[in-house]
Image (cartoon, helix red, strand yellow):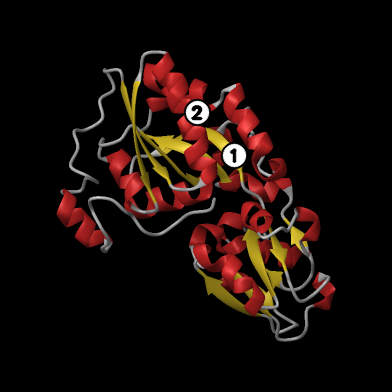
Amino acid sequence: MERRTFIRGSLGLGTLAGLAALTGCGLTGQATASGNDKTIKLIVTESAPYQEPTKLAQKALEADGWKVEVKYVTDIVQPNFAVANGEFDANYFQHASYLAQFTKDKNLAVEPAFYMYGSPGGIYSQKHKSIDGLPTGAKIAIPVDPSNNGRALAMLAKAGVIKVAEGKSVIHLSQNDILENPKKVTFVEVDQQSLSKTLPDVDAGFLFVRLGAELGLTPEDALLFEDNADALPFICLVAAKPGFAETEKGKALEKAYHSDEVRNWFKNYIGGVLPTPWDRDPAADRKVWDS
């Protein structure tokens, strides 16, 4: 899932520790979210596939008598803390792999509520026409964050560019698992925001399908593209506290986000490159990823 790294608004910029000190472990000092009222509080990233569906969902919810409060941010750390602290009912900014890794590292009780859109990725190049055309010593840009780091490595391993340890899920794969690198490929770890900007400076690089589309690149232009199974852990989702999905609020929120209006928005966004696998169960998928 594409993710950003800074937060705007009344907090300004600062480190995680500074943010926690300023907010008393909350995000903005607002009242905590309640499961019993008719107000739904959301924290959502500032990016079209998140903002626009949220606006449509908000309109539908308000038509049904709900009050919806949305805070748009560009931060990828505080939203999970804000939900775990009860300040917001749910967040929408991340994919399943990131959520799993983050909640494990930070010991947070936040879980998938329901899926929103798939975000497959590929290896693209503005210098070479095929994966076999990569020169010895090629520089390949890959995401720096652990939850996305192995995606490029898995594709390169399947293509025979490198050899990696067998039996590891893509969400746990890292450069430490590279056993053979006959082309002496150099991996340049890059923040997600910079992947598309870095592409002209490297031989090839990993891009989310959305970032590729924004550069005018389609999956057919990719040197390599993720198989459906490898892309599954990277479905973007709405996350909340355990049990939220079964509450009145949770069901109303899912109904609004999974409306025909939202589905049509995704179909019309950049040629419909982002799938909406709403019939999948995140909990069932996670059992597969963790096995």
- Where is residue 9 drawn, in percent x and y? 28, 50
Mark 2 element type: helix
- Where is residue 218 drawn, in percent x and y? 75, 54
Q: Nearer the viewer, residue 155 or 213?
A: 213
- Where is residue 194 drawn, in percent x and y? 53, 67
Side of 126 relative to 69 (left or right)? right
Q: Residue at x 71, y 58 (%)?
A: 216
Up-down relation of residue 193 to residue 287 (above or below): below
Q: Which mark is residue 117?
A: 1
Q: Nearer the viewer, residue 277 or 108?
A: 277
Up-down relation of residue 164 to residue 249 (above or below): below
Side of 30 relative to 214 (left or right)? left
Q: Residue at x 71, y 64 (%)?
A: 123
How crowded is the residue under tag 1: few (<14 C-alpha within 10 Å), some, or many (20+)? many
Residue 68: quarter of image: top left
- Give the Cα distance between marks 1 and 2: 15 Å
Residue 205 in view (yes/no): yes
Residue type, numbered disc 2 = Leu
Outermost top residue: 64
Residue 265: quarter of image: top right
Side of 115 relative to 5 (left or right)? right
Q: Earlier in the sequence, mark 1 or mark 2?
A: 2
Number of marks in picture: 2
How crowded is the residue under tag 2: few (<14 C-alpha within 10 Å), some, or many (20+)? some
Mark 1 element type: strand
Up-down relation of residue 142 to residue 188 (above or below): above
Q: Which mark is residue 56?
A: 2
